[in-house]
Each structure stands twice: as structure tokens, then as C-alpha cells.
Image (tube, rainbow, N blue to C red):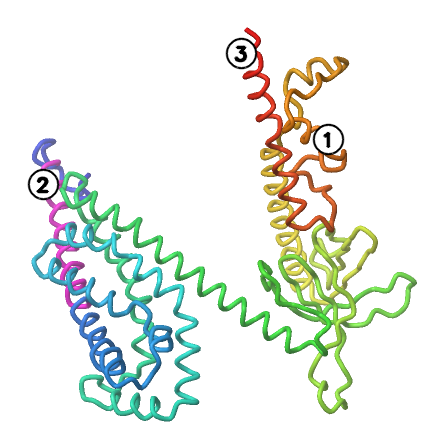
Amino acid sequence: MSLDPRPVGAAGGTSDSVQQQRDRWERKRARTARELVLTEQKYCQQLELVTTYFVEILKAKGTLRQDIRESIFSSIKSIHSVNQALLAYLEDGKFGLGFERFCPHLNYYYTYADNFQKASKVLQIQVKKNKAFRRFKKLQESRPEFRNSKLEDLLPLPLQRIQQYKHFLRDLAENTSPEHPEFPQFSRAVKAISGVSQRIQDNARSHENHLQMQRVQKLLKGRKTKVLAPGRWYIREGWLKAVPPKGAEAKPKMFFLFSDILLMAKPCSPLHPTNGDKYACQRVYPLKECTVDKVFGHTRSQGGLISLTFTEDKLLLMSSDQEDINDWYRSLSAAIGQLRSRNTAVHRRDDLCRRPLRSAEDRSEPNTPAAPPPSRKRAMVTAEPKEQSRDPCSPRSPAGGGQGSASKRMKLSEAPAASSQESAGSSCVIL
């Protein structure tokens, strides 16, 4: 639809506006394509610096062991080879075909993204402890081709390039007509690139969370309280006043909120020679069975009070800053809600995996005595103790059963199917 206020003929005005829109699309598409080619050329040149002056020469000189070299550079040589092929398509103007051939090789980027944090750590250690590698690295970076770039600046380039690809492809898709043969190629490439981009973001979040957990662990005195745990996420921390149950004076405490626990600590004595800047953990509250309520602080009054109810305890937290207490309330509510939703999903999955130990005929006729076992195998199954005839997916399994008892229960759960087959076979013999 034309935005021109001047009156135009119906046919002529529509045709002109459509053509103008197509011309705008084509100009934007050409500008995006030109920028994509220029940045790809620079990107390939930077990858070549790493592969030529570091990967290949280090392999020839043997300055680093093979496992260390692979830990630092991972799949960057394969990425360079794949992107050189992509650049050839882009320079020929075959953008859709180029990315269609490029996307099946994104596994090299997945590998590089998953290994990147380890690569950075190994590189840092080698620069610090390996004198020969440190001298070699400084010599290579002084070459004019590097233009004062450091190896630490070049290694993150593949991760950054994936984010750039996502924006370039979206712009190309938005400025390409749906009838154009390259439009479906761009759409598929956007989806594939977005998957790698999401993996990179998830890895960065996971690494940042790990650093936060390590920081909190170092803030706590002693090693009794374990903060680092699989699947646990750091959320926030801050000072709040814990209201005693018997009306004593409320004392400020440091609280650390994670995805599954709330940790309350008090500061150590500043005069302590080694723990003056640390905290002593007092309680660890599990959020699994917790409910949170706002006692007061609903209006624009000063401060607020929230109540946390656990299975065997209750905690009142107070703050004179209403915005702060409201943020704590929202954070606690969100953490408890997400924890419960995950537990609900696990219970539903357990319910789906449960299978009855008796056949349908046994359930329909509970008073009918069971027939004697026709074979030695069935006699062994029916002679199992009653404790082992429990549901294999039931959470009430013995705590000390271990992996061996679990395998026994899984074999027992397969017994009804085997029994039904044997009974069918015996009936055929009788006939």
C-alpha cells in the first residue's frame, strides 16, 4: 500500500507501490550481501593467521603436546576450511546455495563452542607455565600480519561470527521475496545458525553461573557447606534481617539464593587472621517444600516482610527497603515455581513409565487361584520375594538397593510378558 497522499489510479498506484517496495528490498539485500562478503573475507584471513602461524607451526615444532594443542585450538582448522568454501560461494553471489552447503558442517562450530571455556583455561595455563610457548606466542603476534592482535583476541572469533551470521541471514530473508528461490534456503539457514547461537549463549550462561558458584564457595568459611552441585544455579545474594520467633531483636544476615536452596550466613569476625572477609553458614533451607508469602509491603510503605514456610521450620525476612524486599519476593517465588514445575514433570514421566506386574486377566479375576507354573523359568519368577515385586519405577524403592537391585526389579517387570508368551505356547500344544 502506497503512503503517497496524492491521488493515483487504482491499477497504476498499486503497481508503482509494489515496484517501489521491491526496489527497497533489493537495495537492502544488496547492501547486506556486500557487507557479508567483506566481513567474511576478513574473517577467513584472521582464521588463516591462527591456522598457519600457530596450529601448523606448533605441530611442526612440537612446542606443545598434541593433546594440549587440540585443547586450545579444537576444530578451528576445520572451521577455516569450511568457511573458505563458503566465501567462494558468497563472492560468486550464490548466497543461498553457499549457506545450504555450509550448514551441514556446523558440527565443527558446536564442537568449538563446547570446548571454548576449556581452551581459554588451557591457554592461560600454558602462557603462565610454559616458557617456550610464551616466547613463541609473543614472536608470532609481533608479525605485521597480526596488526597487534593477540591470540586471545582471535580465538573467540568463530563464536562471534555465528552471531553475525544470524543477523545477516535474517536481513537477507526479510529483504527477499518469498517467491525467490533463495528464500527457503535463507529460512533453513536461519534456523540452523540459531541452534548454534543458542548453544553458545547457554554455554556462556553456564560458565558465568559456575564462576558465581565458585565465588560464593570461597566466601564461606570451611568446606562443610557444598555450594557447587550439578544442576544448581546462582540467582542472587544480599542482606536481610531474620526475625526471631520469640520476639528478640532482628539481626542482619547474608542470604544466598540458588535454584534449589536458600543459604543463611553470618559474617565472621573481622579480626580473624584468615576468615575476616568470609561468612559462616548457619542454615541451608531447601526450596522444594517451601511456600513464600508477603506479610506486609503491598503498599508504598517503607520496607516489607516476607514469610517462608518449610516442612519443619518457618522463616521471617524483613528489609527497610521495599524495592529490595519486593525483588526478593519475586526471586523466591520464581525459584520455587520453577522447582515445582520440574518436579511435576519428573512425576508425570515416572507415572508414564510405570507398568503393572499382573496381567489384565489377573486383575479382572482377583479371586481365581493362580495356576501352577508350567515351566522352571516361571517357577523362578513367581518364587521371588514379595519385596522385589514392587513397581520398578516407584520412588518407594529401598534406599540401599543400589544398581544391582534395580536391575533385578527391571527383570521382574518383564516377567508378565514372558509368562503370557509361555502360556500361549502351552495352549497351542494342548490343542
Q: Which residue is mark 2?
A: 16
Residue plotted at (28% across, 69% down):
76
Q: Give the residue furthest to the right.
A: 246
C-alpha gap between disc 2 and disc 3 = 82 Å
Residue depth check, mark 2 versus mark 3: number of the one nearer the observer: 3
Q: Main secondary structure of the magenta part?
A: helix
Q: Give the residue furthest to the top.
A: 431
The amino acid type found where label 3 is placed reads Cys
Kindly state the secondary structure of the residue where label 1 is placed. loop
Depth check, front residue: 423 or 216: 423
Q: Which mark is residue 383?
A: 1
C-alpha gap between disc 1 and disc 2 = 87 Å
The amino acid type found where label 2 is placed reads Asp
Q: How many marks?
A: 3
Q: What stretch of residues is rendered in magenta?
A: 14-39
Kindly state the secondary structure of the residue where label 3 is placed. helix
Measured along the vertical axis of the image, is residue 142 above or below residue 111? below
Q: Position of residue 1 (x, y in %)?
A: 19, 38
Quarter holding residue 264: bottom right
Q: Which residue is mark 3?
A: 428
Q: Position of residue 142 (x, y in %)?
A: 24, 91
